[in-house]
Structure formats: C-alpha cells, structure tokens
Image (cartoon, coloured by chain):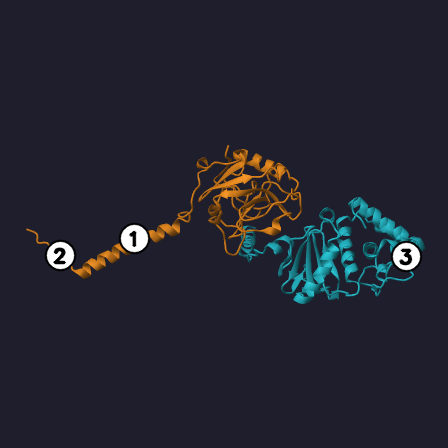
Amino acid sequence: MIKKIKASISEKVILIFLILLGISTFGTYFLIKNKCIFVKNYNPKNIDFKNPNNIVVLNAPCGNVIIELYPNISPNGVKRFKTLIESNAYDNVAFHRVIKNKLVQAGDLEFGKKGSLDYEKIGTGKSGLGSIKSEIDNKFNYDKGSVGLARTFKSDTEDSQFFIILQDEPLFEGEYTPVGKVLYGLEVLEKIKHQRHSEYILRPDFINSFKMFN
Amino acid sequence: MNLIRAILLLITLITPLKANTIYNLIKIPNLEIYDINTKNKLKYFYAVSSFRLGVQKNIVCLNPNRNDLEIKYKTIYKNLSRYSYDYLKKINLKYIVLCENLSISGINTAGIPDNIMKTLILDIKFNEKYFERVIHHEVFHIINAQHKKLFNENEWIKFNNPQFKYAKCSTCTKKIGLDTYKKTKGFFTEYSKSTASEDMAEVYSHIISLNKKKIDQIRKLDPILNNKISYIRNKIKQIDNSFKF
C-alpha cells in the first residue's frame, strides 16, 4: 500500500510560482513574437459602404486596411490607382519606406517585388504605364489616414507609388495628389515594419494583396 | 564591386532619419510653420535656429527676432497677397522662408529664389527703406528662373544705349544703390545697372510698387524704360493673362 504524502505549504507555493512563471514566459514570448495580436482585422463584407465601387482593400501582415477612393478629387490619380489594383500589380510589393507614426510608402512595382527586391534602386521604380499629371488643385485635408500618390521632386511625375500618412500633414495639401482615405484598419499600418535610423527598410513587410471591394 | 555595394547600402541604412515634413518638402533645416492658412495658399516658414545650405554650405541665414518677425510678416503678407494662387502656381512659388542676415559666401542678400523647390528665402531685415519693393524684386527672380526662355537677355540689352555694358555678375560691381533715380535715363536704380536680370527685376518691382500715374509719367519721359516696362508687362501677360499690375 502506497502511503500518500501531503505537500507542504512551501512546496505548494513553489509549484504555483513555477506554473505562473511558465505561463508568463510563454505568454510574453507569444506576445513579443506576434506583433499583430492586438490589431483588429476588419472584414469588409461585414461593413455597409456608401460607395462600394470606390472601396479597395489592402491586406498587410496584420490584417485588412479598407480605403475609400475619391475620384471626384483626383480623377486621373484614382483611375491609375484602380488600374493597378485591378491588375493585382500591388500584390507582394514592399512597404519600402516607413517612418514610424508618420507614413508608410509602397508601390515600387519595378524594384519592390517580393523575391526580386533591389535595395539599391527601391523607391525609384516605375509601373511601365508612364507618369501622370499631379492633381493638387482641389481642396483636400491631409489628415491621418489620407492616401496620396508619391512623386519625385518634380510635379507631374506620379506613377504607381503611394503613401498613407499616420499623422495629420497639412503641408501635403496642394503638394501631393490625394487618392483616398483609410476608413478602417489604420492600426494595421502602424504595425508595418520600420527602422529607427532609416526610412528605407531592410527585409520589409509586403502587401499580401490589394483588391477592389466590388 | 559587391563590397562597395554593401558599403553603400549600409550607409543608406544608417543615415539618420529626418522625419521633418518641412525639411522633406524644401530641404531646408530648422524651420517651423509661421502661417499656412493664407488665401493664395502661400506657406510661410521661419527659422527657429540658423541654417546653412548649398553644397559648400555657403548660404547662411539666422533665426529672426520674434518681434521683428511679427512686424515684418504683416508687410510681407500684404505684398505677397497681391499675387493670386493661379499666378503663384504659374511662377512656381509656394513656400516663403523668413530669416535674418541672409548671405551667400559672406555677401548679404535680400532673398534667394529656388523655383525647383518652389521656395523664396527672404531676409526680413534687408534694406528697411525699400523692403516692400525688394520683396517683388525677389519674386521676379523666381519668375525669371521658372520662365528662363521667356526673358531673353540679348533682347533686353538692345533696349540700352549701345555704349552701355552690364557687369559680369550682380556681386562683382559696386553698383548696388536702390534709391530710385529722379532722372531715370533707362534705369530705375543704380542696382539696375549691375546685370540684365537685376535690371529686369528692378523694372518689375517698380511696376508693382509705383502707382499707375507715376509709371505713365516715367514712360513718357524715358523711352528706354518705356520699352523695358512694355517688355516685362508683355512677358508677364504671357505667363498669366489675368495678372493686373
């Protein structure tokens, strides 16, 4: 007959401590590794949109970013943006320029594609469709979540690259062609990989897919 | 070759992050917004500390005294408000940088135009007496830089007496007086005689600053200036037909 030995109080305390330590270690490891854990992933199908034809969905590592496009403000810019989205041109393209809490930039179709990234030239690539004219005359408030077309120092050089701002930027009005605004999922963009000392990112995050809602 | 590429990449990646929007837009450091809600959409910045520009860092300007800035801003704003948004767009001017004691290679200057960056740097303390006129003089340099082909110096030189010759550059002459001549004789000021482009800028700034009656009077008395005034007016009309002097 096996005699049962009761655990002493100190043994019980140590056991509970070890269990808690295990849980916290595992939990911390899980939380640190998964940067997306507290990011809400919006499903566009569960949302009613006023203008569903102007809704586009960008899927990034932490979930969906739902953007409304404004063809009334920048008809040519939005037309170019839609053309590229409909041809899946932005899929697997890097967020090559990221400034924490300020902006994310992507859309280099020439040097920013997953598998053929060119770190020397990234940010200078084109779409092959040619440049379009800047559309900067209509009033547009560049507040947090605004989406604009990137360009070189010269006007009328917009092509495929775009940026989304993570803070209000009143000076961007009249400077960059606006194409839309983020309706849902801005926090997804705040989790895009950035670097402390550089706007340009080594081993960047990529756009998984970028599609029209309808 | 690969090593060089790796080094270049490393340099790019460790470059300090300058997340300043104004710097990103016009590549001038140490600026802050003074006023951006203007009717003609001009954006005014001021230097919060001194800055140096250029490849050789030979352009220097200091931060202005706050009281001086407040006083001078009213004058600058009033004068630049004469230009409409459309006009400013056509001449490619959008940003005004206000600072003090502006100099290039140690030589003081009223303003530095940069039409590529759509920027005009203005020294708020330069020549108190003719400050308002000097603002328009500097605006002309932006116009001239943006529409170089329009303002032909060879055509302009023909307006002067054949014996007259401009200096090789505006800083290699002692002709820097800005007082308007009582007897003009083809030139509004002594500084007009420095170079053709400075002469054009002086004509432009006088057309803007003087009243119509005075300009008409000068045109009647001075055939050379009459031609120069017509030339500048015609060229400006080619840029923006709706502009009114």
Residue A89 lies, in percent from the top left, at: 54, 36
B99 or A17, nearer to the observer? B99
Q: Is residue B133 left or right of residue A3?
A: right
Q: Secondary structure at mark 1?
A: helix
Q: Secondary structure at mark 2?
A: loop
As shown in the figure, which amino acid type bears the numbered disc 1? Answer: Ile
Q: Report which residue position mark 2 lands on.
A: A6
- Measure the C-alpha gap from mark 3 to mark 1: 90 Å
Q: Which mark is residue B186?
A: 3
- Measure the C-alpha gap from mark 2 to mark 1: 25 Å
The reply to whether callout 2 and callout 1 are in contact (CB within 8 Å) is no
Q: Is residue B146 left or right of residue A15?
A: right
Q: Report which residue position mark 1 lands on.
A: A23
Q: Is residue B177 above or below residue A82?
A: below
Q: Residue at position x 58%, y 46% from top?
A: A123
Chain A's colour is: orange
A101 or A157, nearer to the observer? A101
Number of residues whose C-alpha sits closer than 10 Å to that of mark 2, classed few (under 14), some (14–19) or many (20 or more): few
Q: Residue at position x 28%, y 54% from top?
A: A22
Decide if residue A57 is in sight here: yes
As shown in the figure, which amino acid type bears the numbered disc 2? Answer: Lys
Residue A21 lies, in percent from the top left, at: 29, 56
> Is label 3 or label 1 in front?
3
Same subunit under labels 3 and 2?
Answer: no
Q: Which mark sits nearer the N-terminus, 2 or 1?
A: 2
